[in-house]
Amino acid sequence: MSVPDRRPARADLGPVTGAWVGSMGWRSINLHTHISLVHRYVYVEVPKAGCGTMKATLGGLEAARNNPGMVERFQDAPHNRLAATPFVRPFQLPDAMLEEVLASPDYRRFTVVREPAARALSGFLEKVGQGLKQSEPIVEALREQTGRDIEPADISLAQFLGVIGALPSRKQDPHWRRQADHIGLGIIDYDAIVHLEDLDASWDLIGELTRTPDLRGEFFCRNSTGASARMADYYTPELLDEVASIYARDYADLTYSRP
């Protein structure tokens, strides 16, 4: 049995939705956009920027409307996209309603971002250093460049940056994609863009955005690489220059200073 392609045509989407889909693709938007119709907010996930903490905390809030068991199940595995999720996904909404969610002042939209050099290093240490599936395109690109076989554990940070820096954002893996492009900055009107470095002090703001004033964050991430504390072990001034070039828009538009 063949399954028809029922993805919406861009011409049928609203102007904001269509522009974001054109920029980052329908799949990425569905994977990283978490919608609460009850509390009328949208959290756009940036991988390697506190997304485990955010999904566990907000997911627990949403799942609590169902039962305690679902809260525990979701918080135990916030990254498991195959498990039941308490959030609504963009593909589940009619086109006009999705446009309302992404553009109307009736919904509050926010995201959490991270200092680009620390985020890129975190993605490198976890995904490439551990040889996870996200490392496969990096390995393949280096094999084509050098004509030699290479194992993920043998890839240097310089080689990694050389591969990802040559790619447009849409073709970068979301774990090191340019954040300003990933979140549709300039397309989506955000009520707040929280720096991960300020997250501990931002729960009152997030509680206001989610219309739950008593919200408190809890740290559920079990995959921390400690990248922020290991910058000097991996970055030379030249590599920092390269990161500043790759992520120039992130540094400028997300108001980060070059480390």
Image (cartoon, rainbow, N blue to C red):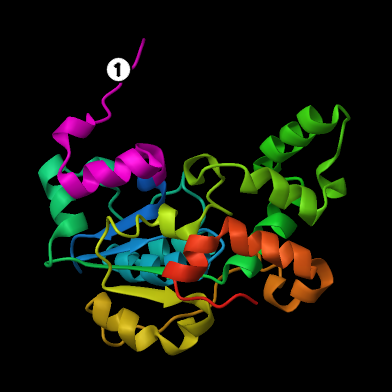
Q: Amino acid at mark 1?
A: Pro
Q: Nearer the viewer, residue 3 or 194?
A: 194
Residue drawn at x 16%, y 50% is 99
Residue 189 in sight in this render: yes
Residue 38 image position (x, y, % from top left): 18, 65
Q: Is residue 58 left or right of residue 257?
A: left
Residue 118 image position (x, y, % from top left): 65, 69
Q: Which quadrant holds residue 217?
A: bottom left
Q: Which quadrant holds residue 204?
A: bottom left
Q: Which quadrant holds residue 236?
A: bottom right
State the SS at label 1.
Answer: loop
Q: Quadrant of the C terminus?
A: bottom right
Residue drawn at x 53%, y 67% is 49
Instruction: Look at mark 1 in the image and give the residue it sits on.
Output: 4
Q: Quadrant of the N terminus?
A: top left
Magenta residues, as a range? Answer: 1-28
Q: Is residue 246 above or below residue 193?
A: above
Residue 51 in sight in this render: no
Q: Is residue 103 above or below residue 8?
A: below
Residue drawn at x 56%, y 72% is 115
Specify few, some or many for label 1: CA neighbours under 10 Å numbering under 14, 14-19, or 20 or more: few
Task: Indicate yes or no whether the magenta region holds residue 247.
Answer: no
Task: Indicate yes or no whether the magenta region holds residue 21.
Answer: yes
Q: Residue furthest top?
A: 1
Residue 32 image position (x, y, % from top left): 40, 52
Residue 78 image position (x, y, % from top left): 49, 59
Q: Is residue 201 above or below residue 206?
A: below
